[in-house]
Image (spheres, helix red, strand yellow):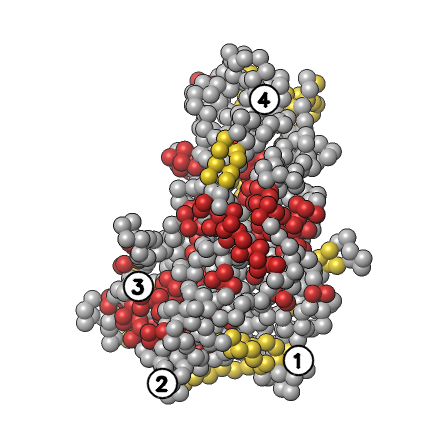
Amino acid sequence: MATNEGETLTPKSNFLARALRYVLCSKLPQARLALGLIASSSLVTQAQTVTLACPQGFNNIDAPINPAILMASLKSIPNPILPKDPTTGARTLRADLTNYVADLTSAIQLGKALFWDMQAGSDDRTSCATCHHSAGVDVRSRNQINPGPDKLWSPLSGTEAILSSTNFPFTDLNASPRRNTDNIAGSQGVRKNTYSSLDRTKGTEVVKSVKDTVFNLKGINTRQVTVRNASTTINSVFNHRLFHDGRSQPDFNGVNHLGYRDKAAKVWAVSTGAVPYSVDIKIPNAALASQAVAPIVNDVEMSATGRTLPDVGAKLLLRKPLGFQAVSTNDSVLGPIADNTAGVGLKLSYASLIQKSFKPMWWNSTKSVTLNKKSYSMMEANFSLYWGIAIMLYEATLVSDESPMDQYLASRTFTRLPDGTLESTGNEALLDPVIARFAKDGIALDRATILRGLRLFELPVAPAPSYPVPMDANTLSPRNGAGCIACHLGAETTSASIRNLTGPGIEPGDTAFKSAGFDLRMERMFSYLGFDPRGPLTPVPIGTDMITVDSSTYTIKVGSVAGNPVNPAIALPIVTYDSGWYNIGVRPTAEDIGLGGLDPSGLPLSWTEFLQKTLPDSRVVKIPGGGITSQCTPPGSLPGTPFYPEVLNPYTGFPLLSGPLLPTEATGVAGSFKAPGLRNVELTGPYFHNGGKATLAQVLEFYDMGGDFANATKSPLLVPLMFSADQSKSLLAFLVSLTDERVLFQKAPFDHPQLFIPNGASPTNAANDQLLEVPAVGSQGGPILSRFLGLNPFK
């Protein structure tokens, strides 16, 4: 029997290994794998196919499991845009951004003004904040429905439908009567218009109404509604890409959301007194800026069709910033420049704010610039650059890292018990504010319940053959949990974070993979995990003791189970996907292909499929992947010594599924959406990309059932968890402990100017709006925010 020798790498686990095998991914120095290797060709000829035998069995493990990745306070994570000075702890500007920004304080002021200014919309009513006005999301309930792919309003009552708790969940295939609608709870944007010109004498847009056959009331256009639910802006600074489908690229080109994909995108620079010249810029890890420049010119969300960001600049440079809106003198950002005399807007113009915020090379010219046969000033032509960077800097301040759970996690320490499990201790009194808050609503929580929820969140699902999960609701240290942290990874609670995908990584082994040139933005995984009739999460049948591996094609077959040859051998389905984006079966994939879609040039949004299609040879990209665990023990071990290594490819030393991206290998990206962060999730309903769940309890029921639809690319980890009532309450208690009371009470940095938000058409004239006022709030905060429809998250 041959053996592999050498240090076992600490691999980046695939999606399966994240949820089930955390303990197996820890570093095992100089570990020997006692695997029978019978090569079909010799190593001299670079053989790719081997047979691996393990008499004790693959993936038949019932051992204590601890997570290698634990939840942590968000305070422990550096801000990717505004890092702290290592000496003073003061907020600073990331070094590369100093090429653009002259004064950070002014740039944040500019960004906040642009984000909240209703004048930015073609209708002078719609700002970025319109769809992100409450805990970073949209909680309006009237005219918020898109009819969905089938274009039918049923079962809701049309464009002016008023949502209520009885409409949710949109999908419940076990209800009687059955619920199954493709309607979408989105956000109302603008009425359908085309842009003609700007009246520069009045600073008003000239637009022409276009008949809307979908969003209308008795022939009068009403506000269009987006096809996806609005994501929260809070903590979005930690995301590598933005939007549910990831179309907002991490590199900002200064013009649009497409980053490197748009080779023609150019901004304007100038030497003192010279004519502006075009320049190609790409700012890394700036998805916030890429995202910001998309809705402002989107003809459903904020803009008349055909309007450009230079057109927006031409308009706003003629307007008083926030000219229709009150600004608190105590506003944490805008207070010092609020126009107290007029009672609305700011004392400084947008031109002044731009000049203070950005270096002269990006605005200091009196020469005009021609774009699309139209003449603009340099400041107008570069307005997309200012818009993206300034709003990014403002949104980078919106970090909610002071929730009761964050404070508890910062106090937590760990002790390794004799049985190998971890015991954690911390200052539990830090959780009391959330207990007191819910007590006022008659909901009884306690510290033990919240901490059980934390452990269920952190601990992985039990491996075969003990599925369904034997979670113990009566102890603070259960052996197994719900595996939520598999996708809601690290302190950011999302595996789609900058740190996980392009930074130092979060999982054990990321450093080893990065050092070996692997691309952490993608992973390769087993796509079928249900060989046992009870549905355990295992890629091989229980008792498998021999497999064959062809690492040139990632073909793995089961050749023997419990000593009995399998003929024909069982092929294990394998796919590659974009890390952080998952199909979880919210709706049928055909209704919204998500990450499986295309950008405006017809190229895939998915990194995996983009590289397959655009590279001359995609094999230059190496993809991390996990493998299969075995119970084989190292030579010389004492009898009965358990050993649970991940099986490594004998030719590469990496787990079986790690290696080059093949040009034609199968992908699992269709219908996938970004794993969202979970802080303040109590306040960010309705949930999922279609807004189809109204409460956290409905979301948890969805996961308890293993998703609503068995899509072909659905993650195999979405399995029924069969929660007890105590377990459900514990997880919900944990989730509400993630609410930062500064967000809840709109305290700095979450304070804001006054805002008037459209809430459906006027009952007397459908061409007019009903408006809701969001009052200006200063740094000390204001009224407590309401949950969506005021619903109880536990019901």
- Disc 1, SS: strand
Residue sitting nearer the eye, 275 or 518? 518
User: Which residue is under mark 1?
Assistant: 217
**Mark with earlier residue (1, 4):** 1
Q: Can residue 67 be seen in this view?
A: yes
Q: Is residue 225 above or below residue 599?
A: below
Residue sitting nearer the eye, 556 or 705? 705
- Residue drawn at the location 47% of the way across and 21% of the way down: 31
Q: Where is residue 110 in the image (x, y as percent from the top left)?
A: 35, 70
Q: Is residue 631 above or below residue 577?
A: above
- Disc 4, SS: loop
Residues at circles 2 and 4 in contact by the CB criterion of under 8 Å: no
Residue at mark 3 to residue at mark 4: CA–CA distance: 56 Å
Question: Which disc, if any, is residue 631?
Answer: 4
User: Which residue is under mark 2?
Assistant: 341
Q: Which image quadrant is residue 370 in?
A: bottom left
The residue type indicated by label 2 comes to Thr
Residue at mark 1 to residue at mark 4: CA–CA distance: 66 Å
**Mark with earlier residue (3, 4):** 3
Residues at circles 2 and 3 in contact by the CB criterion of under 8 Å: no
